[in-house]
Amino acid sequence: MSVIERYGINPDKVVTVYNAVDQAMMNEIGDIKRNLNEKVVTFLGRITYQKGPEYFIEAAYKILQRDRNIRFVMAGSGDMLNRMIERVAHLGIADRFHFTGFLKGEAVNKMFALSDVFVMPSISEPFGIVPLEAMRINVPVVISKQSGVAEILKHALKIDFWDVDGMADAIYGICKYDTLPKMFKKHGKEEVESLRWEDAALNVKNVYKKVYS
């Protein structure tokens, strides 16, 4: 829900300035040797209600009913971690599902380099920079329509966070059809590289100028 709807703000007084990705921090990563032939699908973030980790697990279960040659990774920590581990065990997919714990710095980049798909099924997300970081390293992304970043990204597959079937289809499509990831890798990286903090800062400056002029 936007501030316009929640607080009854005049739309003419609302200006959106979107975040960007730190280009200097997202250097190209060299080839990392993979010991797996399977596709790797990654969730990276806080394992808490807002991020929708349970929907990722349910989508993984549906995909694994069709193809067991895919591995799923949940990277992060949070108050729902133990519950998610129990759910994976209950569904019988623990042999295809991995919990890495909290990752930071170079470990995040390496995780992206090993990934074929990044998924952000957030229930509520003011923006969401992580998909931009994934796209910067040529990883196709599946994101919820409820995330702020969905408003600006064109080269990402967007689903409702609660639509587990749609999420599963999107992930499966990227894993199985070569043309999809090729398109997203090519255009997604170009799109992200055009989102710069310098431009965001300039937009904020212009808002101040307009208000106080």
Image (cartoon, helix red, strand yellow):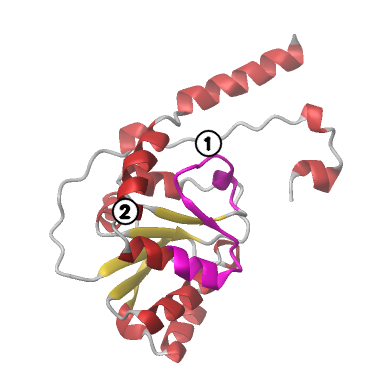
Looking at the rendered image, the disc whose residue lies closer to the viewer, 1 or 2, is: 2
The residue under the point 47% across, 45% down is 129
The answer to whether one can see residue 18 in this image is yes
The residue carrying pointer 2 sits among few (fewer than 14), some (14 to 19) or many (20 or more) residues within 10 Å by Cα, namely: few
Residue 172 sits in which quadrant? bottom left
At mark 2, the secondary structure is helix
Residue 195 x %, y %: 45, 31
The residue under the point 40% across, 84% down is 65
The residue under label 2 is which amino acid type?
Thr
Residue 148 x %, y %: 59, 46
Can you say which quadrant of the picture contains the C terminus?
top right
Residue 184 x %, y %: 37, 47
> Which is more N-terminal, label 2 or label 1?
1
Q: Name the residue under label 1.
A: 19
Residue 42 x %, y %: 37, 63
Q: Mark 2 points at which residue?
A: 179
Any magenta on residue 158?
Answer: yes
At mark 1, the secondary structure is loop
In the rendered structure, are the residues bearing label 1 and label 2 in contact, judged by CB atoms less than 8 Å apart? no
| Foreground of the two, 29 or 160 | 160
Image side of residue 124 versus residue 96, left or right? right
What range of the chain is rendered magenta? 147-170
